[in-house]
Image (cartoon, grey):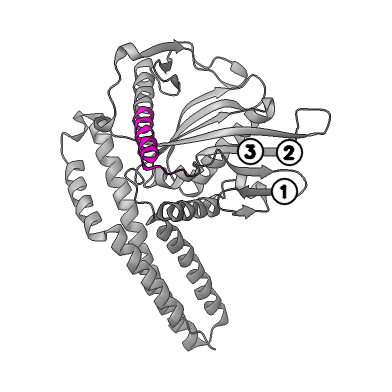
């Protein structure tokens, strides 16, 4: 039986070597050793917030290192499996070898895309906010569909998720939702999902069987350390407290523990209701507000630089993806041209094709 995988195996090893060099395995090991020492300190949990940061950073670094070292082991194992399959002339074993190489290729492709994420905050976790736009009940329903889509994506990757706030619509779906994905490179990965998403379908909420177009906005910001956040004077904010609500506007909390902070100079509003106390919700809302203000400052600085340079480029598109749930049944990214003919799988969290295409497209645009 012929089973010559030497050329493909060499290609996989070469790709892994390139990724290992970019990731910096030696640096990661040093970082893990340092964080492990801090995590083992007997007084670590005297400061729970600091302890959480140390253990989270340690988990992130260990996960990153494990992905690379696991691939090295799998490549060694598949080479042995191929040799045994040849010696025993085992067709079933040969098929298993080829399937494993395909699986390794998939993981390598994901890691290779990750090496393109070299922005200042790309390695951080992400805070995602989804807001319904024009389209009535269809828009609020669409916003909830998008929320489920991202939560399913995170679940498939085994990424921890914390829902921070959900504002339910009077009819179907949600007005808005904010959740945090605590995983390495979650921000860099999901930042290409930011923008306006459009849904076209036969509305389930109308009796005329007419096509309805609705919109939802996705915002993605990095999880920031407090030391890197901007100062917000108390006089610049208005804080409102209210009771947490569930579907249909029903109250799910008998105390006014939910918090809404409005930044008066910019009009930015952040709500939090999923923590147990008003103090915790206020602290969480302030962290998100500070991060949004910092990013707003950076965007204004970048826009000023572009203006001074005299360059005019297309913005990171408002309407970046369309979801067609009638006739042709298609999800298409308008920036990259990547498309999938089965919207159900996309809404079930199969987003990696869109995300990887978006990351490559963005890097090409940056280098143009």
Q: Earlier in the sequence, mark 2 or mark 1?
A: 2
Going from the N terminus, do you reach mark 1 or mark 3 first? Answer: 3
Q: Which residue is mark 3?
A: 198
> Closer to the camera: disc 1 or disc 3?
3
Residue 300: in magenta span: yes
- CA distance for labels 2 and 3: 10 Å
Near-viewer residue (289 or 93): 289
Residue 344 coordinates in the image, percent (x, y): 66, 47
Q: Which residue is mark 2?
A: 201
Q: Residue at x 72, y 48 (%)?
A: 329
Secondary structure, mark 2, is strand
**What's the residue at 42%, 16% (across, down)?**
262
Q: Position of residue 92 (x, y in %)?
A: 56, 78
Residue 272 appears in the rendering: no
Residue 348 on image: x %, y %: 60, 45
Picture disc at residue 329: 1
**x, y percentage for residue 137?**
68, 26
Disc 2 from disc 1: Cα separation = 9 Å
Residue at figure coordinates x 40%, y 46% from the top left: 188
Q: What's drawn in magenta, residue-wise?
A: 291-312
What element does badge 3 sit on?
strand
């Amino acid at each position: 039986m012929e089973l010559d995988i030497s050329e493909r195996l060499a290609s996989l090893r070469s790709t892994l070597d390139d990724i290992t060099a970019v990731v910096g395995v030696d640096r990661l090991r040093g970082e893990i050793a340092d964080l492990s020492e801090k995590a083992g300190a007997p007084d670590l949990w005297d400061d729970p917030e600091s302890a959480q940061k140390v253990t989270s950073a340690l988990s992130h670094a260990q996960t990153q290192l494990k992905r690379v070292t696991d691939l090295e082991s799998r490549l060694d194992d598949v080479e042995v499996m191929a040799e045994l399959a040849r010696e025993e002339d085992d067709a079933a074993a040969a098929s298993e070898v080829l399937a494993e190489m395909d699986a390794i290729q998939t993981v390598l492709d994901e890691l290779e895309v990750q090496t393109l994420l070299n922005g200042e905050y790309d390695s951080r976790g992400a805070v995602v906010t989804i807001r319904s736009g024009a389209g009535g009940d269809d828009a609020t329903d669409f916003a909830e569909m998008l929320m489920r889509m991202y939560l399913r994506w995170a679940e498939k990757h085994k990424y921890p998720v914390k829902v921070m706030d959900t504002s339910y619509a009077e009819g179907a779906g949600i007005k808005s939702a904010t959740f945090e994905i605590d995983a390495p490179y979650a921000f860099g990965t999901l930042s290409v999902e930011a923008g306006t998403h459009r849904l076209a379908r036969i509305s389930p909420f109308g009796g005329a069987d007419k096509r309805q177009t609705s919109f939802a906005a996705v915002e993605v910001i990095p999880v920031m350390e407090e030391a890197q956040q901007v100062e917000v004077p108390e006089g610049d904010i208005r804080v409102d407290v209210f009771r947490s609500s569930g579907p249909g506007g029903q109250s799910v909390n008998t105390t006014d523990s939910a918090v809404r902070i409005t930044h008066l100079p910019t009009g930015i509003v952040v709500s939090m209701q999923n923590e147990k106390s008003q103090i915790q919700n206020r602290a969480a809302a302030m962290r998100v507000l500070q991060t949004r203000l910092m990013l707003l400052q950076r965007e204004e600085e970048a826009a000023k630089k572009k203006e001074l340079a005299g360059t005019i480029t297309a913005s990171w598109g408002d309407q970046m993806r369309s979801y067609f749930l009638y006739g042709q049944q298609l999800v298409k990214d308008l920036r990259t041209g990547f498309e999938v003919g089965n919207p159900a799988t996309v809404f079930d969290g199969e987003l990696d094709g869109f995300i990887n295409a978006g990351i490559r497209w963005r890097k090409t645009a940056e280098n143009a």
